[in-house]
Amino acid sequence: MSIEKFSNQFVCDLVAYEPGKPIEETARELGLDPATIVKVASNENPLGPAPMALDAIRNSATDMHIYPDGGGYKLRSALAEKYDLGLENVVLGNGSNEIIELLCHCFLNENAALIAAEHAFVVYKLMATLFGANYVEVPDPNFVHDLDAMAAAITDETRLLFIANPNNPTGTIVDEETIDRFMKKVPEHVIVVFDEAYFEFVNDAPNTLKYVREGRNVIILRTFSKAYGLAGLRIGYGLGAPQVTQILQKARQPFNTNEVAQRAALASLADVDHVQATVSNNAEGLSFYETAFQEMNLEYVPSVANFILVNVGDGDRLFANMLKQGVIVRAMRGYKLPGWVRISIGTKTENERCLSVMKEVLATF
Ligand SMILES: *Cc1c(COP(=O)(O)O)cnc(C)c1O
């Protein structure tokens, strides 16, 4: 018997988020050795966690019978210090994805709307749908958020407006001047969410912290999943004015971030060398792919993040055929880009392997 008629219709209507295909699953299905598989599908750090984080993870094992620090005091203090903010400005999440959900808990309902760009990170749409809210998608010419059009889309029912900067999966960014012009037009009843998951990869990233300091209704989301290499531990954070963070603190579970994650994240913040190595490996990898795609006459979107979006004609087919050879990329049909794939920047060896398999498969198209 179907239970659909007893459930919330807007939940039944959801198409579940499809993550990058896991290495173990691929190995199992194809009878491959997991060690030979290259996964460049989820924008993870190819250099792994920071060495200082690894120590913290190992050292935490014997304390795991104790609940985590629910207030996340040490990590929040370190983040507050790093950004010259107060403890009250910092909220922790089980990945920054959880903070996206908390924002929806706090501000969305069936009479509210969330605004995002057409090719924005797909989780915003999933969450708006989950809360029965109106999802307003604004066209993004050349894959860049159009902040003028997004401001024009604001109505009395708008509560959340997401600016993914840089955006995933496009790798594009909007500059500070554009953001400043936009912020002048945003009314008080709209919370602007700057999703800055790839912040560490960007040279001269726009200063959005000033809006937190001014006490505007904004929140900046950052994460330890990307440049810090802790995606498996699930830890991210939000920086906002107290009126925004306080309501989020009420909506979260008491122990939403675990103790291992808190300690590893704290240690990661101190491991400056690792972030530097990550960022420079990424810059080399990005230019490797850009040069290759130019030579191959493939359309791509110039990226400032740790991945690149490229038009191969048939993304599903490229994905499926590269998978057979143990290289996992991400097809973009879910983003209404069926011709495209997104490739995360790997190590030099991984990039070379990925490109050579890609060329081999494209030759069969
Ligand atoms: C990866 C990503 C996140 C966050 O991931 P978490 O692992 O939940 O911290 C948030 N926003 C964007 C745009 C991302 O690409």
Image: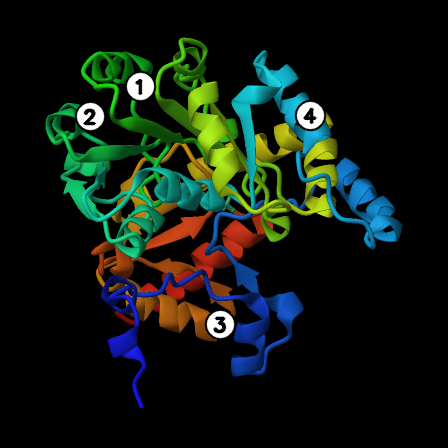
Closer to the chain start, of discs 1 and 4, is 1
Cβ atoms at labels 2 and 1 below 8 Å apart: no
Foreground: disc 3 or disc 2: 2
Classify 10 Å Cα crowding around label 4: few (below 14), some (14-19), many (20 and above).
some
Q: Label 4 amino acid?
A: Val
Q: Label 2 amino acid?
A: Leu
- Dot 3: element: loop
Q: Label 3 amino acid?
A: Gln
Looking at the rendering, which quadrant does residue 230 occupy? top right
- Measure how far apart labels 1 and 4 are at the Cα level: 25 Å
Residue carrying label 3: 325
Residue carrying label 1: 175
Q: Label 1 amino acid?
A: Asp
Q: Nearer the viewer, residue 273 or 258?
A: 258
For the N terminus, the quadrant is bottom left
- Dot 4: element: helix
Cβ atoms at labels 3 and 2 below 8 Å apart: no
From this viewpoint, is residue 292 visible? no
- Measure how far apart labels 4 and 2 are at the Cα level: 33 Å
Percent from the top left, x then y, of residue 94? 56, 46
Q: Nearer the viewer, residue 238 or 44?
A: 238
Residue carrying label 2: 147
Classify 10 Å Cα crowding around label 2: few (below 14), some (14-19), many (20 and above).
many
Which residue is found at the position 37% from the left and 23% from the top?
218
Residue carrying label 4: 272
Cβ atoms at labels 1 and 4 below 8 Å apart: no
Foreground: disc 1 or disc 3: 1
For the C terminus, the quadrant is bottom left
Q: Nearer the viewer, residue 19 or 277?
A: 19
Classify 10 Å Cα crowding around label 3: few (below 14), some (14-19), many (20 and above).
some
